[in-house]
Amino acid sequence: MPSEKNFFPITFSFNDAVRLVDNLIGAKGYYSFNIEKTRLVYFPFWFFNFSAFTETDSGKNKAHKEIAAGSKGFDELGNDFSEKFPEQFRNSELTEFSDKPEADYKIKLKQSEYSSQEVKEMIQVKLASMFSVPKQNLVISSLKLVYLPKWFVTAIIDAKEYIFEVSLIKQEILNPGIPVRNHCRRKNNAPLL
């Protein structure tokens, strides 16, 4: 178990997650369904600041020109950047991290698979490609691992199991793909009478 204060607090409860799923299923025309179980899973996510620059050599002197700088988040599992969350993190009052997951819920912790040095190198390669600069022209600072919680809500709809992933950060269902029930579909967009 990580020892630093790096668990994002639960700001969207079990009941909130179930209510979101209930509303989605009802909006798709299903009125007979069961919520079977819920799980709270913490995923590794990395915050960092960066600066990218170009370098010109004019004889004796080297000149650096910053071309981009800011904060980003790196989703380790998705191996991609997140633009939205670092901004929300910076501007949010909910930045008090705890040193352990919420005790009231049964949780699963997805450990980070990489060291901070490995993540830093992955980030540098991705940013170098993004800004078309050599890897050494990127400075990564304030790299911090945090664990972000997501609810997984399992529902049985018409004898078929669906697992909904609910982001506690965005407070929305990340995979809302269930079909509209047949009696709710309209042919050729005909108006409902």
Image: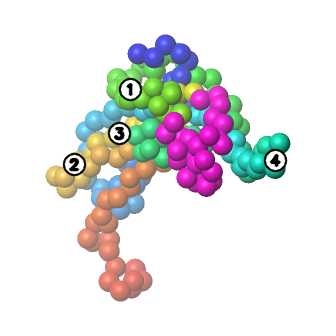
Name the N-terminal-most of marks 3 and 4. 4
- Crowding near the residue tagged with mark 3, few <14, some 14–19, many ≥20 C-alpha atoms within 10 Å: many
Residue 158 pos. (x, y %): 19, 56
Disc with the residue nearer the chain's start (3 vs 1): 1
The residue at which mark 3 appears reads as: 152
- Which disc is residue 139 wearing? none
Nearest to the eye among marks 3 and 4: give it. Answer: 4
Mark carried by residue 111? 1
Q: Which amino acid, by three-letter code, is at mark 1?
A: Gln
- Number of marks: 4
Lower sequence index among marks 1 and 4? 4
Q: From the viewer's perspective, tell me whether residue 138 is left or right of residue 153.
A: right
**Quarter of the figure with residue 14:** top left
Measuring from the top left, give residue 184's x and y in whole percent: 32, 71
Query: Do labels 4 and 2 touch, CB within 8 Å?
Result: no
| Residue at the spot of label 2 | 161
Question: Is tag 2's residue or tag 1's residue first in the polypeptide sequence?
Answer: 1
Q: Does label 4 or label 2 sit earlier along the sequence?
A: 4
Front one among 58 and 6: 58
Judged from the image, the secondary structure of the residue bearing numbered disc 2 is: strand
Vertical arrangement, residue 43 with respect to residue 126, above or below: above
> How far apart are the two marked residues, 2 and 1, measured between alpha carbons?
27 Å
Q: Position of residue 102 (x, y in %)?
A: 46, 21
- Residue at the spot of label 4: 59
